[in-house]
Image: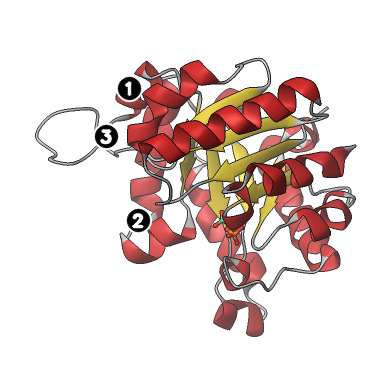
Amino acid sequence: MRRKIVAGNWKMNKNLQEGIALAKELNEMLAIDKPNCGVVICTPFIHLASVTPVVDNAIIGVGAENCADKVSGAYTGEVSAEMVASTGAQYVILGHSERRAYYHETVEILAEKVKLALANGLRPIFCIGEVLEEREAGKQNEVVEAQLASVFNLSAEDFGKIILAYEPVWAIGTGKTATPEQAQEIHAHIRSLIAGKYGKEVADNTSILYGGSCKPSNAKELFAKPDVDGGLIGGAALKAADFKGIIDAFK
Ligand code: PGA
């Protein structure tokens, strides 16, 4: 059966020292009070090599927030999937709405990133989700279906390594959370799309996380929904106690 996962997305927050301190604090908390779900922290690139050795890998996985769509070479400022993997990181967030909106990442670019992440042994946490106008127009189902094209070209075996995160853009960092019913409805739709493409077994084994203003006070009711397998957490991942509060929703 699919894994329950709480993943943090630090975004562009925390300098190196602050990031190491946060990772250590979380590691200590979870060593004392073991989680009932998978836990991942996704950090800025420069933190990865310093954060991986300070966390117990049996409890906390580490991931990047992006990787390049090219293998290597003259791409100034880019960081490849191979470089990410060489730090000991095991995950990479791809397709986050901020990357799609501000850095113009398309379905095709993201398909390349997913391919390179998998080729280097990284597990993509692949984000999909609609903006407010699309939700208001009732287009959320078609929007996520179109975004899934970046991962629906994979073999069933490779697709099995993907973690999906449904993040309605109108709920990210806004304090406006999708209701558990809204989350359940679209998560079930996403799972039915996976079943249509790869069959029921693959669909049943795919973890689909919810993201968007998830916090300790609302995590439990969101995660109680049958098709919500955990969360991708932004703001509330920046404080160990808040992040731990969300992890504890699985207790
Ligand atoms: P938020 O961000 O929890 O701060 O809304 C979630 C995300 O963007 O992954």
- Is the C-beta of the residue carrying label 2 under 8 Å from the nearest atom of ligand 1? no
Residue under numbered circle 1: 82
Closer to the camera in the image, 165 or 217: 217
Residue 187 location (% of width, % of height): 75, 55
| Element assignment for label 1 | helix
What amino acid is labelled 1 in the image? Glu
Q: Is residue 200 above or below residue 136?
A: above
| Element assignment for label 3 | loop
In whole angstroms, how far apart are the C-alphas of marks 2 and 1?
20 Å
Image marks 2 and 1: residues in contact by CB distance under 8 Å: no
First in sequence: mark 2 vs mark 1: 1
Q: Which mark is residue 79?
A: 3
In whole angstroms, how far apart are the C-alphas of marks 1 and 3?
8 Å
The answer to which quarter of the image holds residue 114 is: top left
Would residue 29 be seen by someone viewing this image from the given angle?
yes
What amino acid is labelled 2 in the image? Glu
What amino acid is labelled 3 in the image? Val
Q: Nearer the viewer, mark 3 or mark 2?
A: 3
Q: Quadrant of the N terminus?
A: top right
Image marks 3 and 2: residues in contact by CB distance under 8 Å: no
Answer with left or right where residue 123 lies relative to residue 77: right
Residue at 47% across, 60% down? 97
Q: Quadrant of the C terminus?
A: top right
Closer to the camera in the image, 75 or 152: 75
Residue 145 location (% of width, % of height): 59, 58
Residue under numbered circle 2: 105
First in sequence: mark 3 vs mark 2: 3
How many numbered marks are there? 3
Q: Is residue 98 above or below residue 121?
A: below
In whole angstroms, how far apart are the C-alphas of marks 3 and 2?
15 Å
| Element assignment for label 2 | loop
